[in-house]
Amino acid sequence: MNHVGSIFFRILDIFAHFILLNFLWLLCSIPIVTIFPATTALFAVTKKWLHNGIGVGVIRPFLKALQENFKKGFIIGIVWGILALILYVDFVILLQEEFTGKFILLVLCIFFLIIYVFTSIYIFDVIISQSYSVFHTIKVALLLSVQNIIHTIFCIVIIIVYTYITLQLFILSIVFGSILAFTISFVLKKVDNKLHSL
């Protein structure tokens, strides 16, 4: 009975860690412009959990990672936001207007959207793993996404499936970000060693 109780409290403790991490991530993302630094800190903590166990805690490693990666995460977040806006405006115009060459431009937009999504999967891992410049961080994230296409597609499927499940069971939103980041960090763990060669 004591063994069962110990397992139960251990599971409860792990769940509490994920809830707290998710709360910190959401809290630090509220200003919108800080979403990238907050998400970088989120991935930094889940990566630490994978390497050192959940015992490393939540608040201290999160705040430390947020401070260390805030500047780069903020700048990349601004760049990423601008690129997302450009893609959105292009799609809106292309879907509303009729003109010669529309199909070619639509294909190009879809291609750039795929590149954007692929790079987004790896960009947080690259930020916390290497002290690259902003441009080189984006470049490495893109290269990794193409070189590890199976992992990339798998991560996209995970995001889609978990987002769908969370929309159906809204209670899961209390751990949405932390569980998703932990799962993606786990999948990308096998490609981390390739970072040093890029």
Image (cartoon, helix red, strand yellow):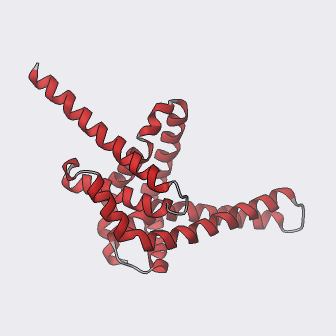
Q: Residue at x 53, y 44 (%)?
A: 160
**Against 127, is 45 above or below?**
above
Q: Residue at x 33, y 64 (%)?
A: 65
Q: Which residue is drawn at 72% across and 63% down?
A: 107
Q: Is residue 153 left or right of residue 175?
A: right
Estimate the x, y position of residue 61 in percent, counting from the top left.
28, 59
Q: Which of 32 and 108 is in front in this view?
A: 32
Pick out the residue farthest to the top.
1
Q: Quadrant of residue 67?
A: bottom left
Estimate the x, y position of residue 102 in percent, counting from the top left.
83, 64
Quarter of the figure with the N terminus: top left
Q: In which quarter of the image is residue 87?
A: bottom right
Count every numbered label the image shows and give the total. 0
Q: Is residue 113 left or right of residue 92?
A: left
Pick out the residue farthest to the right.
99
Estimate the x, y position of residue 130 in percent, counting from the top left.
34, 74
Quarter of the figure with the C terminus: bottom left
Pick out the residue farthest to the left.
2
Estimate the x, y position of residue 28 in percent, counting from the top left.
45, 56
**Against 5, is 92 above or below?**
below
Q: In this view, does 194 lie to the left or right of 25?
A: left
Q: Quadrant of residue 190?
A: bottom left
Q: Which residue is drawn at 50% across and 36% down?
A: 166
Q: Nearer the viewer, residue 183 or 23?
A: 23
